[in-house]
Image (cartoon, rainbow, N blue to C red):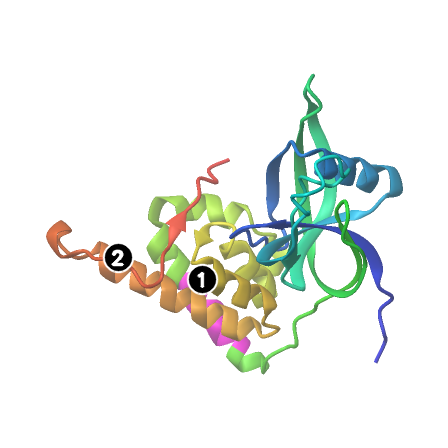
Amino acid sequence: MDVETPIEIAVFPLPEKVCFPGQSVDLHIFEPRYVQMVNDCIDHGRLLGIAIAQKVISSPPESSPHHPFRNLTTYEPRPIFGAGKVEITKSLPDGRLLIEVQIIDRFQLTETLQDIPYLLGKAIPLHDIPDPPSESSNYFTALWATCRHIFKERFVYFEKSIDKEAILLQDLTLLTFSVFQWVRLTPSLMQWALETTSPVSRAKLLIEAMAEFAKNESKPESEKGADVIKVDFRSNEH
């Protein structure tokens, strides 16, 4: 088995933000340390990882008002996250940046090189482990049919967003990642889906979530309750 060489990735921890391969993420960067992070990524050709923040690991001492990092709180990210190439779409006069990150893959953090002023580490790609071909084919068909049923008139835009060869090959990894660009579950479920290496397990979660969504939508307004599984559809009609 080939061992992949870890690469340097700057990691941006964000609350409740889970990003999947193929997704385009627009961000407003205003903290000086993260402006530096973006510029360093561009200058050194690094990828930028967007990781859900799981807890605070350090806070600056209140007794040091002149400490250069006095406003910095360091968050521990989940070790598996989406990462991609960052592009500055607009530089504002006051130093703030509008950026776009094209997520190209999932990565797993293997080493922390620094955590101040921002987190820089080494990471390796996280790949799916193929499920049995017949099971993958069955779940590709089931998820495709579920999307057609749930998305309704929006399905045509969803279909256009997926590579035709991936559809012909019934690439369940690509299909599940693509659905997560349209469907939003709770952050913990999305992180679980990002971390699992089984495309079938991701497809099962999506099918169950969308079935729950459809069931709740079919109820009279007076009987609708808060979904245990929350699903929101993004506007991708382009």
Real-space Cα distance between discs 2 and 1? Answer: 26 Å
Work out whether residue 171 can be spotted: no
Name the main secondary structure of what is drawn in magenta: helix
Residue 137 part of the magenta segment: yes
Q: Residues within 10 Å of mark 1 (few under 14, many from 20)?
A: many
Of residues 116 and 122, the one nearer the viewer is 116
The residue that label 1 is drawn on is: 144
Q: How far across and down, in percent of the image, does residue 210 sit?
A: 36, 61
**Residue at left 87%, top 37%?**
43
- Span of residues in magenta: 136-145
2 within the magenta span: no
Residue 225 to residue 133: above or below: above
Which of the two residues, 77 or 202, is positioned nearer the viewer here?
77
Q: Callout 2: few (<14), some (14-19), or many (20+) C-alpha neighbours within 10 Å?
A: few
User: Which percent across, then down, holds residue 109?
Assistant: 74, 64
Q: Residue furthest front?
A: 63
Under tag 1, what secondary structure?
helix
Q: Tag 1: residue type?
A: Trp
100 relative position to 123: left or right = left
Q: In this image, 107 relative to 188: left or right? A: right
Q: How many marks?
A: 2
> Any mark on residue 94, and which?
none
Residue drawn at (54%, 55%) of the image: 178
Counting from the top left corner in percent of width and height, residue 6 is at 84, 64
Question: Horizontally, is 9 left or right of 191 in the view?
Answer: right
Residue bearing mark 2: 226
Looking at the picture, which amino acid does disc 2 mark?
A: Ala
Which percent across, then down, holds residue 114? 81, 54
Contact between labelled residues 1 and 2, with CB atoms less than 8 Å apart: no
